Image: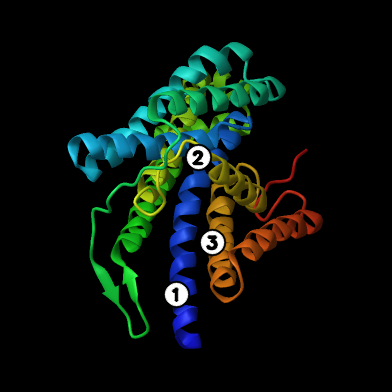
Amino acid sequence: MSFEGHLVLALLEGSVAGFLLALTALGLSLVFGVMRIVNVAHGEFYMLGAVLAWYVCTTTGSFLLALCLAPLAAAGVAVVADRLVLRRLGYRPDSTIVATIGILYILQQAVLTVYGPYARPVEAPVYVRLQLPWFGYSGYKLVVAAAAAVLLAATWLVVSRTTLGLYMRATQQDPEIAQAFGVPVGRVYTTAFGLGAALTAAAGVLIVPVQQAHYLMGLDALVLSFVVVILGGLGSLKGTIVAAFLVGLSDGVISIFLSPTLAKTIATLLVALVLAVRGRGLFGEETA
């Protein structure tokens, strides 16, 4: 294949990866931005979405139903975890890190017990292949990018144009003052935690026809989400999306022309470089 063909393939793969990575990391950024806690269990909700998608597709044969039900189920688990664990800890940053590590292992071992240690495939709902001059490209991957783009746009509209989004932004700025003005801060925290879980679970559903569902698949999602959120700026949704495309496109280009291992190394070095020059990330706000 010619250089042009390799370049087009790299840009396509990088763009799809960028959309999916933005959707995966957006939930982590949202939780930190609103609640000011680090959700170490974030990757397990990604895994939970993939596993539930396999179950729904196996029992009903409907991928669309899986895309609707799995994020809702993951959000339900997150809401229960928030009510039973995080709220009782007062959302203290040090305590919630330990608590979310515990949630991580509980979810992981529960899935291992019920689902088993095996990687299980899900058939792609779209079998169209886009024929380009240099190669054929999976139509389903383009569907993944489009679906992720719709979910990202919907999340952006919720945060920027709705009363819930106003409450989230007010809570992010100062929860005590927000509560004094009648904002139900506790409910906002619960909603943000559930929404963050639903977003990453949706990413898990979308990826499972490409990457099989497995009970350990949450680790890579967690690490890449941290890379993106730190690079973009903690709590910045715009920064998360921009950083996701930087990482996704660089990963696509380097993986095609050099090696996938080198791509992950360069992404880590990029984070270190940005933090060395601009410690709060690309779009992070100054702290007082």
**Residue at x 63% of width, y 14% of height:** 89
Element on which disc 2 rests: helix
Element on which disc 3 rests: helix
**Residue at x 60% of width, y 22% of height:** 102
- Could you give the CA–CA distance between mark 1 and mark 3, rounded to whole angstroms? 13 Å
The numbered disc on residue 230 is none
Q: Quadrant of residue 177?
A: top right
Percent position of residue 192, x then y: 48, 30
Q: Are marks 3 and 2 in contact (CB under 8 Å)?
A: no
Q: Is residue 30 visible?
A: no
Q: Earlier in the sequence, mark 3 or mark 2?
A: 2
Q: Which residue is mark 2?
A: 27
- Could you give the CA–CA distance between mark 3 and mark 2, rounded to whole angstroms? 17 Å
Indicate the amino acid at tag 1: Leu
Element on which disc 1 rests: helix
**Comparing labels 1 and 3, the label whose residue is closer to the camera:** 1
Indicate the amino acid at tag 2: Gly
Q: Quadrant of residue 264?
A: bottom right
On the rendered structure, is 141 left or right of 231? left
Q: Earlier in the sequence, mark 1 or mark 3?
A: 1
**Comparing labels 3 and 2, the label whose residue is closer to the camera:** 3
The numbered disc on residue 9 is 1
Percent position of residue 273, x then y: 76, 60
Q: Which residue is mark 3?
A: 248
Q: Is residue 19 above or below residue 287?
A: below
